[in-house]
Image (cartoon, rainbow, N blue to C red):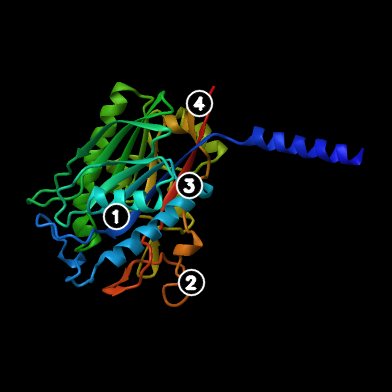
Amino acid sequence: MKLLNILFIALLLSNLACAQQKDTLFVAHWNLENLFDTIDDPKTEDEEFLATGSKEWNNDRFDKKIYNLSRVIRSMNNNDGPDLLGVCEVEHQSVLDSMLTKYVSDKPYKIAYLESPDERGIDNGIIYNSARFSLLDVTGHKVDIGNGNETRLILEGTFLFDKKDTIYFFVNHWPSRRGGEEKSEPYRIKAAQTLRSEVESILSKNKLGRIIIVGDFNDEPTNISITDYLKAKPFFCDSMDIINLSEDTESDLFNLSYKAWFNGLGSYKYKDDFNMLDQIIISKELLLGTQIKYECNSFEVYKPLMMVTRTGKFQGTPFPTYGGSRYLGGYSDHFPVTAKFIINSK
């Protein structure tokens, strides 16, 4: 009799656990830190990442790099991998193809990608779960920063999710702070204006449009490029915020990374400070909608132990591929950022 009771309780708990499981959508972004191939591209400034270049980049180092990246990607989402992953600092789609083919071939991943006019040849890309997403369109939005300078395209992937819901996914890598934050700020403002224009175009046709914006913005959540020009509102996710949000008729983009930044977290360490350069921003429908909805406080700076520097001066920072010109054999100088969305199939 006791055995039957034990079996009954075990079955009940198992059924309860299954009932509590939620269908989710897992989104991530990661700056992959100079994921170059080993072949000279005469159209770009990639000489540094050749066997004869200052980084002494070769096939063994490339293979170690994509193996390391694949380990982190596979570990996301409780080892199920992300459903949508935006990446930046990638030389060509072929390097992502190599990584997926060699180390992630058991996952139904596909790639959306366009070459950018960036002088170093580094681009943005999207890795997506083709079992859940169908790619409807991929577009590259050019950012005109003037003076004949070129920067990365803002990559837009339009997807059909679970065969019924359209999601607009933007991947960004805005101009760096080279030359100083203040001097370079106008370039990031140009990128923000370009992206804002595309967001408004979508929302003018459908005010309930589901938009997910990810990227390395080279600015933080409270910089004016984000708050004033992109118009992404800092967002704390709690019950009062949701109530206020339903009454807010002016805001349409919300920055999920703000709370983590406010709490002193960051995705990239510069000198003694962690900066939240990598962010996830979403449209209002993904906060208030019923079909696909952000899971409150699920935004995370993802720090798997394998890619965290354990000791020394840089303890706690991402373990990079290079420290200056010295090869370290690590992962990236940025931590990924992630967020989860609840799916209501009814």
The residue type indicated by label 3 comes to Phe
- Residue 290 is tagged as 4
- First of labels 1, 3 by sequence position: 1
The residue type indicated by label 4 comes to Thr
- In this picture, is 194 found above or below 224? above
Residue most toward the bottom?
312
Q: Residue at x 30, y 48 (%)?
A: 97
> Could you tell me residue 279's position as x and y percent?
38, 48
Find numbered disc 2 in the image and state the secondary structure of the residue it sits on: loop
Q: Nearer the viewer, mark 2 or mark 4?
A: 2
Q: Residue at x 48, y 47 (%)?
A: 299
Q: Residues within 10 Å of mark 2 (few under 14, many from 20)?
A: some
Residue 155 relative to residue 341: left or right: left
Q: Which residue is mark 1?
A: 218
- Residue 299 is tagged as 3
Find numbered disc 3 in the image and state the secondary structure of the residue it sits on: loop
Find numbered disc 4 in the image and state the secondary structure of the residue it sits on: loop
Q: Residue at x 19, y 51 (%)?
A: 186
- First of labels 3, 2 by sequence position: 3
Q: Residues within 10 Å of mark 3 (few under 14, many from 20)?
A: many
> Could you tell me residue 282's position as x and y percent?
39, 37
- First of labels 1, 4 by sequence position: 1
Q: Which residue is mark 2?
A: 310
Distance CA(mark 1)–CA(mark 4) = 33 Å
Residue 76 in sight: yes
Distance CA(mark 2)–CA(mark 4) = 42 Å
Residue most toward the left?
148
> Could you tell me residue 65's position as x and y percent?
34, 62
Task: Give the camera-side residue of 32 and 337.
Answer: 32
